[in-house]
Image (cartoon, rainbow, N blue to C red):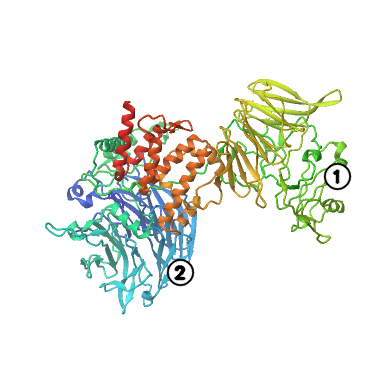
Amino acid sequence: MKLLKPSWVNHNGKPIFSVDIHPDGTKFATGGQGQDSGKVVIWNMPPMLKEEDEKNENIPKMLCQMDNHLACVNCVRWSNNGAYLASGGDDKLIMVWKRSGYIGPSTVFGSSSKLANVEQWRCLSILRSHSGDVMDVAWSPHDAWLASCSVDNTVVIWNALKFPEIISTLRGHSGLVKGLTWDPVGKYIASQADDHSIKVWRTMDWQLETSITKPFDECGGTTHVLRLSWSPDGHYLVSAHAMNNSGPTAQIIERDGWKTNMDFVGHRKAVTVVKFNPKIFKKKQKNGSSTKTSCPYCCCAVGSKDRSLSVWLTCLKRPLVVIHELFDKSIMDISWTLNGLGILVCSMDGSVAYLDFSQDELGDPLSEEEKNNIHQSTYGKSLAITTEPQLPNTVIENPEMLKFQQRQQLQQDGEHMVQAQMEAPIHNMASMMNGESLEDIRKNLLKKQVETRTADGRRRITPLCIAQLDTGDFSTAFFNSIPISGSLPGSMMSSQSNQQLISLDSNTTSSSGALKSNVELVGNNTKPAEETANKESGNVSSSSPVAPTSITAQPKIEPMKALDSRFTERSKATSGTAGVAHLNQTAVDRLKEQNVTKDSKPRVVESSSDSEEKIPASKQLSKRKGEADADLAEKRKKGRPRKESQRLMSVSLTVQSQVASTSEKELTCVTTSSLTLRLPTPTPQKSFTLQLSSDPSMYIEVENEVKTVGGNKLSQLKCHREGKEWEAVLTSRIVAAAGSKEVVCVACEKRMLSIFSGSGRRIFPPIILPSPISTLQCTGSYVMALTAAAALSVWDVQNQNIIIKNESLQPLLSGNDLTVSQTLLTKRGIPVLSLSNGKAYCFSPSLSTWSLVSDKQDSLAQCADYRSCMPSQDAVMCSGPLAIIQGRVSNAGRQAAHLFTMPHLVQKETTMAYLENQVAAALMLQSSQEYRHWLLIYAQYLVNEGFEQRLREVCQDLLGPVHRSSDSQWESRILGLWKRELLKELLPLIGQNLRFQRLFTEYQEQLDILRDK
């Protein structure tokens, strides 16, 4: 062991309360008291490690000094990825720092130091929530959360991905909270306070897991800080300042049952800080010794008010080393290097000490893979688990695999070279500044300033801007003459997911029905709905024509509202066009008001338990003057219905089941075993306009009853497309219209569907629908019609054939209170219906059945954890039909909660099941890009989790038979994609895991054979 106390690390005689080494080992930060404010200083690490660098005047020792805190700084902590530095102080603030580029030197304003800052650090965010001094801050293992504690008795959890958002405030301590530590697994966070307790909180719901008080009953609040620490294997939590038989100890708390049977003893005064080595060790094997594997152990450093430091190994009953009288005052903080062989200690006397150990003294550190295996075997899932690009102890057996690994390495080296070229000017600028004081730099700058004389002889100097500019983020080490051991785990980098709006296909437009549609139950002996259709029409207005409402999805919808059945969406219209929505009724009401004509019979629908106040009123369109009085009777106010309406609703239908008689205030209940579904139909409008795409020059206009020929009123259809216009005349009123770039279709009152080409040519004679239209939609050359009798049909206009013929929605709407909330027709003519219960179904023509493709309440989606397998470019996922239907936004809090609510094996199965569902749903929807997207994610997950059998099955299906055979039924394409090209994309994913190198080699060789053929 080597011990060093560098005199150049100081705060000008002021106390240093905190120290922390950067994860890459190139620098360290100190925090404490400044001249008249708090001070944070970033120091260069190489002069601490090597004497030559310390004596070299060209290598700076101080990299940056920040005096932004208004009062003493109590804690500084680097994030695990090294990108950020958090500091907390007596000014009740937490400041988050980030390194930035510069174009000139700078120094702290008002500072007496004449040396310029070599690195530039800017305050990224100031976090304000505490009402007292901030005593400690700590980053979570995956850098998604930042915790802070204060003398206001609270612990605040900040969202590190979205500062200054607060996730939770933990209240429960009755004394000053002086220390924090995260469980390396990420399941708990522990806090220690002056109320003689340690409290362990769950990260799943931020509630208290346990409170430990017995070892601290005799303790007094005599320490400035209480820095406790969790062992890297997660088994032990070691506290500061505990008492055992009136003697100061560091209490060891076992994770299993929170037992307090062991402690670290020997210090003469209260323990202020405990810090575990980030590495897990095993005993070093000597030459000729047995190859028997030793039990892993941890290393812990303990600092006390008695100015001594002790280093313990959990495999030994006595400390490894004890250093007495190391400082003149109490030890305040301890920090280990990432490689586990170096330790920095700071004291209230304003000095620091560095201890350098060897592997012979501590042992052999376990690799990250071995550490991950310990976490995974013990806890299943851990936020501290990191991934390495390859297994260091695995022998590459095949030259193809070796070539692949070399290509990957060259690609990574190329990326690093580009980054180095971008950072070269910064290094050059820094090297030019070496050894040059700020005064010399300012003298050179004065030569460039512009000086003029006014008429009265006064000097006027034009200001020269020499301020710092942020030119980017840089994280390279300055002036290192020796390599720094240890590197950052790439998987610890966190990124914030973005919420994006989802757009539908520009060719898809629709204009009929309502988003929140109604399901009506009607007896079989009733008359068709068209006999009682509403014959009202809207006012004619040249400035604001009325457009019918739409049951289909509009070009832009919010992700979380894609399947929401509680809001109404109006159809998109051009300037001066207003959308009018139907009143939408749920099946709970089971009522539909109709205009009573001479030939129509009143309907009564089942409503045995609903009160009269739940009967909805029809939303009326604007009326013509001649019909205003007639419509007055249809308007209803909230509350008790009118007597006429009560008599209308009390009429019962004659059906084959019994009719239960109720009281006079209740409606008559009709129950029948033979009921049919009824969907709402759009009301004819005098005129309306419909946009065909995002291009405002493409739209259609509909005018009903514009001409009279022989006493019959005609309707007119106009289509405007790229400056051209065509017209068509129809004999009955148009109630719904839809169109795309290829076709335009309209549905009329007499159940007729007319389809026109893009230039206005009629393609078919009028198609007679079995019942009135409810929804009409068109995408590309496909036309979808959903009738009031809940029957769905889809036509392929280009090939002039029918794909789906009168398919009933009865299997989907058989439950109670179900409505159709959204419809979608894909580019390949696959219809999709979303219901009010959050489920979405598509009809497969090849299987002739409905299939569930999405469920808003799907527990598999809520528990699946596949984010590590997501590609960096995720634009495809947000544009396909599956993404439009599901419309989910990732919830980090929900996923973090589910991460620990189930065993890891169960979570692996749920994730795999969810990904398989996504691949199958994309295949059912015939969405080729989404199929490829989810297939790659699924393959990546199989590689990460080691599911070789399923991975082989996927590869075999994509490869197909190597030799041709007349009996083979294998298709070389799927959704227009070449299967073997997909396999070529999968092989690099398989090559990332050396455990699958034989699988990689097997299919790579077969692809080479097929290529040679």
Q: Quadrant of residue 300?
A: bottom left
State how many labels appear: 2
Residue toward you, 428 or 923: 923
Residue toward you, 717 or 368: 717
Residue closest to the far bottom? 245
Which residue is disc 2 drawn over? 173
Residue closest to the far left? 288
For residue 52, side relative to residue 574 (left or right): left
Q: Position of residue 181 (x, y in %)?
A: 37, 61
Q: Position of residue 22 (x, y in %)?
A: 31, 51
Residue at image position (22%, 50%) is 47
Name the quarter where the C terminus is drawn: top left
Q: Position of residue 918 (x, y in %)?
A: 49, 43
Residue closest to the far front? 967
Amino acid type, residue under disc 1 in the picture: Leu
Residue at image position (76%, 44%) is 619
Q: Are marks 2 and 1 in contact (CB under 8 Å)?
A: no
Q: Quadrant of residue 349?
A: bottom left
Q: Earlier in the sequence, mark 2 or mark 1?
A: 2
For marks 2 and 1, give the CA distance. Answer: 66 Å
In the figure, 961 relative to 482: above or below? above
Which residue is disc 1 drawn over? 632
For residue 622, side relative to residue 942 (left or right): right
Residue at image position (74%, 37%) is 772
Residue 38: assigned label: none
Q: Secondary structure at mark 2?
A: loop
Q: Position of residue 242 (x, y in %)?
A: 34, 73
Mark 2 or mark 1, which is nearer to you? Answer: 1
Amino acid type, residue under disc 2 in the picture: His
Name the quarter where the N terminus is drawn: bottom left
Residue toward you, 664 or 227: 664
Pointer 1: residues within 10 angstroms few (<14), some, or many (20+)? few
